[in-house]
Amino acid sequence: MNMQHVLFCACVLGTASLAAEPAPPPPKWLGEVTRVAYTDLGNARFAGDWPDKVIADAAAAGVQMFFSRVHNGSDWEGLAWKSDFGPMEPKMGGRDCTRELVELCHKHRIRYLAYYWAQREHASVAEAHPDWCGVSARGKLTRYFCINTPYRQLVRNRIVELVAKVGVDGIFFDMFHARPDECYCACCKAQFKQLTGHDAPTVENFENPVWRQWVEFRYRSIEDAMLEFNRAIKAANPEAALVVNTWNAWVYQHALKARNSIRVIENVDGILEETGWYDTVDPSFCAFPTLYNFMSWHLAGLAKEKPAFMWARGAVARLPIGYTESLTRQMVMLANGSVPAQSVPGREVMKRYMADLAEREKFVRGSRPLRWCGLLVSEKTEMWYGRNEPQERYIKGIYGAYQLLLERHLPVVLVTDRDLERGDLPGLAVLVAPNAAALSEKECENLRKFVRGGGGLVATYETAMYDEEGQPLADFRLGDLLNAHKVGEFDARAIRVGWDPLKIHYANWYVPAKHRWATGAVRVAMERSGVSDPTGTVHTSLQLVGRLLAVEPVQGKRSDLRVSTSHYSEQLKSVVSTNHPGVVENKFGAGKVLYFPADLTWSYFRLGDPHVGGLLEQAIREAAGQPPPVEVAAPSIVQATPFVQGRRVVVHLLNDISSLGRSQNVKGESLRERTEVIPIHDIAVTFRDPRLKRFTLVPGGAALPAEQTPEGTRVRLPPLPIHAMVVAEEP
């Protein structure tokens, strides 16, 4: 390691204290942007209508912020602007294309963010500075550059130049992620050694605490770089914005394994996510039918008070999509709290959907999700409990919980483990914790505090059975709160059909016919008749698919809602059966806890059994102790998301079923766009706040007549096309 490396490592080590002070505040203008045009067109070469006519048409359509590429990794030989910190791309032919584009955008009153493909450079840079390159565990140079080398200073110089001299309004970093087989360069190894006293581990090993430190080190390196870059551009222009791509809602151990920690939002002005490239063959894992709804909701939840930009390609394969598909994608993003930032499919299509966004933006700016139910999505559980199969062990359960809440029209906000560590749970009546296995002592204490103060908790399966590093515990870390003690476990994920006693292996619910939850969807399932059932038969045994724990309550009586298991024991040469509580109830302080030992939300993701959904919905409502402030009566295919905007309540209603279902039919195979809309009828919204007396339908501005009911003030909607908003206000 040469002296330059030594000095730079010392500099980077000093950044460990950067986070002691918060990042500079985001510019106000960024939070007011609702109409974004994103294009994969680059500034290295102008052709056809790009950029003059394209920008003019974007301005005429009402675009407020525009992205295009000024740096494209290894795809270009140089930079798309005249720079003191790198050669200019020869295709520019002497023109300073980025400066021209910035002037053009500003002439039309459009904010311009420079797209910078981070950590990639032309081969000539690697040849000149091989010590800047990332290094794999085997000691081979990678195609990415390491941010802990002097390459970091080069990037910093360039983005400051873009802000201070070229005049861009901000920087968007794409592909700025931690990767699993990087970086083992001399600088990273020296920094890690100084910070931890250990050599950098080269083999993924979740039992090794040094491996977990290594993963954290890689994430912290990105976060510290973002904080440094943010401060640098703000020093050049306090109104400059820094936005970074996260990849946190769909990458989950897929082929790339590249991502950032959820902490990155704390050091930047906004975050952006890609919708899984759902119009191309993609190995990413998402849930059906909630996939892009979840991604937009999750991104907005991570961003909190900062803007979240959701991106999608404007094409199916190589053909630009039409208006219906474009608008559907835009409204999925908008209804879930994200700012649509779709790549422009065509200028006429853009013109139409920008007008749709403009008509809604008055009721979007400054709005925040209505808080009633929180869904805990734990990064620690996903990473350290989920390990190398987080989709199966954890994420499917998260998707199932979200899908349940979406289909039952229950308002839900994201709660992260960062929120739980800080005890940041204001305004929530109930928290849903699906298999939140890896919890710290601080998180557990804040859960106790939340419930003791009157909050409700619905938890499932192995919640609090592991420490924050994913190491198993002998029993529940929250045994007092959950009121449960583990006595065994059972895996009933496989669906078995047949009567061969040697293959018996299943679990069932026992729901007494007079149980308080034997109503609604649960009752319907109990009354489903087989061909030989006499009329009026009520089944008290219902299918349970998934993993489960055998538990007993620490104190109090056993619930009469039971779970029974049966399996053929090779050792005993007979069928062995068990019977344990299907739910454990606990009154804790002023709040209530309902703990299900089964991995219910995984089960709901897998099969969508109505009785599973019914049990969960009733448990959530009961634990909350109060009904949601807004109730929506609509088919389950309609998503309802209520927001608060000052004294207004704005309910987004989204119908993205269209003619093809809510997503591609077969992942990676069926890549068809939606071309028509099937309107949804018979939708009603009930508001419990008696102060809300004026109701307006947006778009259109029509007044909605209201009727008083025992539950509150109800309005009925005309048929819903793709998206509409009910705006409820005081007179």
Image (cartoon, helix red, strand yellow):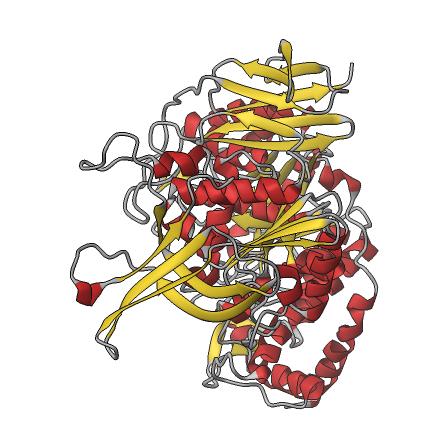
Please report the residue visible at 62 percent of the width from the left and 22 percent of the height from the top.
Answer: 686
State the residue in front, 60 or 17.
17
- The percent coordinates of residue 359 (x first, y second) are 62, 21
Height in image: 193 above or below 478?
A: below
Q: Is residue 358 left or right of residue 406?
A: right
Please report the residue visible at 66 percent of the width from the left and 23 percent of the height from the top.
Answer: 687
Height in image: 473 above or below 344?
A: below
State the residue in front, 728 or 36.
728
How many numbered marks does the figure carry? 0
- The percent coordinates of residue 7 (x first, y second) are 74, 84
Q: Is residue 407 left or right of residue 169?
A: left
Please report the residue visible at 45 percent of the width from the left and 38 percent of the height from the top.
Answer: 314
- Quadrant (top left/top right/bottom left/bottom right) for the N terminus: bottom right
- Quadrant (top left/top right/bottom left/bottom right) for the C terminus: top right
Q: Is residue 728 left or right of residue 210?
A: right
Residue 221: which quarter of the image? bottom right
Please report the residue visible at 60 percent of the width from the left and 15 percent of the height from the top.
Answer: 715
State the residue in front, 359 or 678.
678
Height in image: 53 above or below 493?
A: above
Q: Is residue 115 visible?
A: no
- The percent coordinates of residue 576 (x first, y second) are 30, 68
Residue 285: which quarter of the image? bottom left
Q: Is residue 586 visible?
A: yes
- The percent coordinates of residue 596 (x first, y second) are 51, 55
Height in image: 274 above or below 60?
A: below
